[in-house]
Image (cartoon, rainbow, N blue to C red):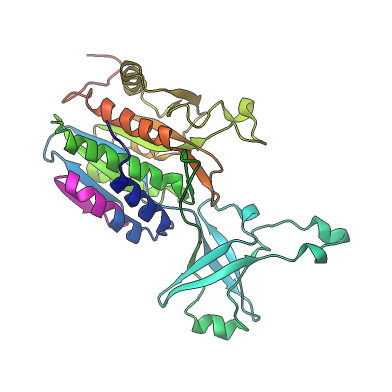
Amino acid sequence: MPVITPRSEEFLKSYLNNASPTGFETSGQKIWLDYLKPYIDDWDVDNYGTAYGIINPGKDFKVVIEGHADEISWFVHYISDNGFLNVIRNGGSDHMIAPSKRVNVHTKKGIVKGIFGWPAIHTRHGEDAKLTPKVDNIFIDVGAKNKEEVLEMGIHVGCVITYEDEMIKLNDRYYVGRALDNRIGGFCIAEVARLIHENQIELPFSLYIVNSVQEEVGLKGAEMIANTIKPDVAIVTDVTHDTHTPLVNTKKHGDIKSGKGPSITYAPSVHHKLLELIIQTAEEKEIPLQREASSRRTSTDTDAFAYSNGGVPSALISLPLRYMHTTVEMAHIDDIENVTLLIYETLKKIEYNHNFKYIQK
């Protein structure tokens, strides 16, 4: 069964190359919905921008599959008299990778190009040799001579800033780019909807394909939409760390490797009867699985769904990712396909009014 087709790969490229920073996801949601619409019966968007499609609407039993749409970014925090921009984070942006990166400053007048500058190595001697990037010393240069020129460009405090990087395919094996965390999850659930449609699968429940906003600042989009939909079951997909790259301690961070399949997580918010259904599905369909455990919380939208509405059976299926929160996030194509297939095949095993209670009355 083909998962990633030429058309879906074109969608992924367009989707990843578009900027959708936390709180400003609208343009990416439009791209996602345009791709999804042929495969769904209805769709909607909430007040903060979480988009969702519905297959087989109107059933009492509701199942959610979910990813999050937002990417990390920066805000303009201060404009110096000399025309340089200081920044604060919007989400978990990594200050260590900023120097020398090209950026887009988003204004009402359009995109203003800029770069994160950094003192040349020739100028760093003695104590200056210890200089390292920090949030309070990195800065953006937009080529302006002073603050007045910056303001004339349309730049003001609060403008959002994203990196200028585009998706590539590496060795015909990996997709590489910024914001795979977690628009790749949005891609996977859209492909699940396509497979259901193309294979004419009749689901006994209403399926909500949800692309949430504001995960990077505290799972806020998932929190809101869980209370709107009030699902009976939620399967969340997000990224996890490939721990088999240099400088990463597998004993500390877990044993997960790209190309070895999706990772399932054991955690308090993960409902273990739903998790066992996912594991059983993987075994029956010979989909490779990896395992990890999270103490206290998964720090994904799984937690928001699980603890909403009096408790919603929820589980997390993660995609191994290299170099998370950088501009060169890397995901193995086999893993992307297997995440998609695992969600798709699991949905086919969920019955109408499926009872996930641990103890039956």
Q: Position of residue 204 (x, y in %)?
A: 13, 29
Query: Residue at point 49% right, 36% down?
Result: 240
Looking at the image, the residue that sits furthest to the front is 171
Q: Where does residue 290 sit, x and y in percent of width and height?
A: 46, 24
| Residue positioned 68% across, 57% down in the render | 134
Point out the image quarter for the N terminus: top left
Pick whichever, 104 or 173, lies toward us. 173
Q: Relative to residue 181, is residue 84 depicted above or below?
A: below
Q: Is residue 194 above or below residue 121?
A: above
| Location of residue 278 (image quadrant) | top left
Q: Who is closer to the viewer here, 175 or 142? A: 175
Q: Is residue 347 left or right of residue 203?
A: right
Residue 47 part of the magenta segment: yes
Q: Position of residue 135 (x, y in %)?
A: 64, 59
Can residue 130 be seen in the rendering of this structure? yes
Q: In screen coordinates, is 213 left or right of 248?
A: left
The spot of residue 130 in percent (x, y) is: 81, 55
State the residue lying farthest toward the left. 58
Q: Is residue 302 left or right of residue 150?
A: left
Residue at x-position 50% and y-position 41%: 171
Q: Quadrant of the C terminus?
A: top left
Q: Nearest the camera: 81 or 290?
A: 290
Say if 304 sits above or below 69 in the image.
above
Magenta stretch contains residue 137: no
Q: Which residues are magenta?
A: 32-49
